[in-house]
Amino acid sequence: MQFTEIIHQLNPLIKCHSLTASPDCNPDINGVAAVDEAEKGTLSYIEGAKFAHQIEKTQASALILPLDEALQAQATQKGIAWLAASEPRLAFAHAINLFYKPFKPSPHIHPSAVIDPSATIGKDVYLGAHVVIQANVKIADGVCIHPNVVVYPDVIIGDRTILHANCTIHERTQIGSNCVVHSGAVLGAEGFGFVPSPGGWYKMEQSGYTVLEDGVEIGCNTTIDRPAVGETRIKRNTKIDNLVQIGHGCQIGENCAIAGQAGMAGGVIIGNNVILAGQVGIANNAKIGDNAIATAQTGIHNDINSGEIVSGSPAMPYKHFLKVAAAYKRLPEIYQAIKQLKSQ
Amino acid sequence: MQFTEIIHQLNPLIKCHSLTASPDCNPDINGVAAVDEAEKGTLSYIEGAKFAHQIEKTQASALILPLDEALQAQATQKGIAWLAASEPRLAFAHAINLFYKPFKPSPHIHPSAVIDPSATIGKDVYLGAHVVIQANVKIADGVCIHPNVVVYPDVIIGDRTILHANCTIHERTQIGSNCVVHSGAVLGAEGFGFVPSPGGWYKMEQSGYTVLEDGVEIGCNTTIDRPAVGETRIKRNTKIDNLVQIGHGCQIGENCAIAGQAGMAGGVIIGNNVILAGQVGIANNAKIGDNAIATAQTGIHNDINSGEIVSGSPAMPYKHFLKVAAAYKRLPEIYQAIKQLKSQ
Amino acid sequence: MQFTEIIHQLNPLIKCHSLTASPDCNPDINGVAAVDEAEKGTLSYIEGAKFAHQIEKTQASALILPLDEALQAQATQKGIAWLAASEPRLAFAHAINLFYKPFKPSPHIHPSAVIDPSATIGKDVYLGAHVVIQANVKIADGVCIHPNVVVYPDVIIGDRTILHANCTIHERTQIGSNCVVHSGAVLGAEGFGFVPSPGGWYKMEQSGYTVLEDGVEIGCNTTIDRPAVGETRIKRNTKIDNLVQIGHGCQIGENCAIAGQAGMAGGVIIGNNVILAGQVGIANNAKIGDNAIATAQTGIHNDINSGEIVSGSPAMPYKHFLKVAAAYKRLPEIYQAIKQLKSQ
């Protein structure tokens, strides 16, 4: 595909951003690549001026650049075709779609799938080999269920949702439209509800259910439990990475991003647009306000206000944490100084 | 069900606790709910006086209350039927059972299950679709194995144990009676046994096996390895949450509760009634005494005495940790003070 | 097997180490055991002088000892046969192989396996029950794929590689020879690539793939994502434990060992012979030099030099961390001292 054609196709997609193209340069582009691995004939991208050195070294024939005239001049001088966008990474995400079509099986039901007669299956559905669909499950149109997935009774799955191989959807789970559940994830299993009793841990039956609203994505081997009563809910367009634990009764807002190995105990309430980095932990019933951010390995025991950025375990404001962490490394010298001062 | 009938049915189950009912109030109850989501006709509960405000707001028609006369008077005044118990949460767990019957397939063997002829299968067993039972497996009476579970050779599974979908039970694992293994869990796989050698990591074969005693519950996607020699053992009535890692050769006592994403390396020995909160980590061969508690994200490198409550990484006594954490947040001001004092 | 026969068989395998045998003692050995669980007729081992007390207590009939004459004399005095090796644990790993043959199904293709006609299957391959092999998959000789594994299109699997039950291999993944992928692991799934956009998180398609070089071992329920462009690569002989998260585009060197629940975000580059202990976290794009070690729960945000040992979150040199951790526990007394000094 000629580079001008790429620009032509991207323009309406990222039209909220300004696009300019280098005037004289129109190479043939046959793929996309990371800038440091790019070969001749590929399109790559650079996020900002701190990656300027990669323009010198890259073999890419074309680059998506930020709105930075110095970088653009540098690319032009090296004979690299470029377009500029205010969000180069977003533009590159669109560019990948021009070259890559994700694997998607054509709609059909494999003869080895085991489907309860009470289940209802929409149009254009793919049910892969060895899929198990139990009683009263409702599968909407265009759903794609990869091999060896097990769907327990009374589950509802919305239009065009994809369930990847070997995941398990427990009874009464409700999954919206356009969701993706990655391999090995377990949705709607029993929450960890054990009550101390004279005879040991007494199991509180988990009569609730788990809900994913539209556009939610759940990573591989992530687990989202259902509660004793009521629901665990992941609101629309929230994206959850691999190996995340969501306890029973959690409510997670819209458009959040939760990174790998984060975990939350029961009853946590998270607002909209919240970002949790990797390995963050949140204790029972904590409330996290809209737009809050927790950096990696943060341990949250108390409520976090909207818009706050927190770090550390126990969590504290990020800016304060930077100072604490700097002093923390100096603790031996602090301790020495104290001993010396006391002896004076 | 009338509220007096609920009291009548709960009374023998929580007979160790005192029960009183509000005199004049006997609504029809058709379900259970969380107090802040309850609708008319539902029964809910409150754990203690700090939730008194929820009595004002709830739509529940009946409440389980603690033995607190002020709360009881408050409920009576609002026209809410109530019963009181010394352990309201435990009473509520029993109440759920009056309204909710967990999904359990009726005993039968699905024709797509693949069962080695040398396996022995007890009475009233359910083997779901695509289950694989390999050589010499012994399955006792009333066992329930959900679809797509794989059981390797020489496994023993006790009476009434439930294995949820997509879990994997490796060779020689012994599972007691009345256990529950949740979806995606892997029991008895090879421990991480690699020995440095001149040619790189040399694999130490893991000839041991994993044992779950009676009444053990294992969460979704949790992994419990087998050791090179001997056994990994989880003793009776211990409950383990999702995404927990139990290394080869660990011995976990009776009646423990281990929360999500906790992990322990090889050879850890844990006493009875121990509680590990979420994301706790325990290093190789550490010993944790009976009744010890580790709070979330604690990092344990050394032995912990019986009854100790520990926090922090590295772990220290919880009460001391609270003081340390308070001073930790003040490290920047401590550092400034030191600098100022030294300059004087 | 007589003890002298064990020595005879071990000698060529650990010939780089000096072996001596106690002169008069040649018991019959019928198995291997941990030293504290050993019964009469078993062989066990001791790693060093700090376990000397176990020689007194063990019931083992023979021991593998380090090159320590005091320990050897002690064993002789107790009438325990012994051999000595410079690496007793490695010698014991070889000894296990004399008594234990790991379970391996004989080559055959189960009739319930679903194999796309475009797949190519080598000689002596085992494909267990309900295995799914999709389009254009290439499976080399001697491969062993346990039940309920799903292999997406265009995957390549090298000679003698073992895939355990219920694991999922996503499209375009390349797995070398002599690899082991444990139960429930997910290789080559979509990286967590979401780009903020005016309409919410925009999904960056993950057009890359994941590569395991020869001799790599991946633990149960571990997840290794593929990137948007290029590859995620695990180099030869690296061993990864259970529940580990490897983000999109990571490059992990040769001969590394990564313990349970460690996790790394996208684009992390790790050198050769690196050891990450349990629950270590590494942030986006950090570089870890050859032979570096991170102790348990370390949080790495920046590059780590070759050969460095790091601890703490944020990470710092291990030796310094020991001092910091010691002073950290004394923070309350430090804070009190400051207050007192300031008031003077």
Image (tube, coloured by chain):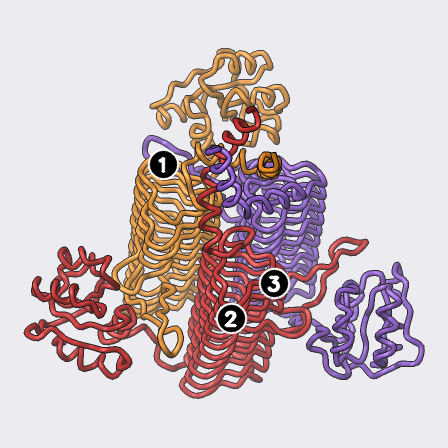
Chain colours: A orange, B red, C purple
Q: Which residue is mark 1?
A: A308
For this orientation, the residue located farthest to the bottom is: B123
Determine which of the numbered discs, if any, sits on residue A129 in the image.
none
| Residue at 40% in and 76% down | A200
Asked whether the beta carbons under mark 2 and mark 1 sit within 8 Å of each other, the answer is: no
Left or right of residue C7: residue B316: left
- Identity of the residue drawn at 43% across and 73% down: B180
Image: B82 above or below C182 = below
The residue type indicated by label 1 comes to Glu
Residue named by callout 3 = B286
Could you tell me residue B320's position as x and y percent? 48, 52
The kind of residue on which mark 2 rests is Asp
| Chain letter of the residue beneath label 1 in the structure image | A
Q: Is residue C270 left or right of residue C14?
A: left
Q: Quadrant of the N terminus of chain B?
A: bottom left
Residue ID for mark 2: B290
Residue A253 image point, x, y percent? 30, 45
Q: Which of labels 2 and 1 is toward the front?
A: 2
Residue A109 falls in image quadrant: bottom left
**Label 3 amino acid?**
Ala
The chain holding disc 2 is: B
Tell me if C1 is positioned left or right of B322 in this view.
Answer: right
The mark closer to the camera, 3 or 1, is 3
> Is label 2 in a helix, a strand or a loop?
loop
Residue C114 vertical position relative to residue A54 in the rendered view, above or below: below
**Residue A120 position in % (x across, y down):** 28, 62
Q: Is any part of residue A29 visible from this angle?
A: yes
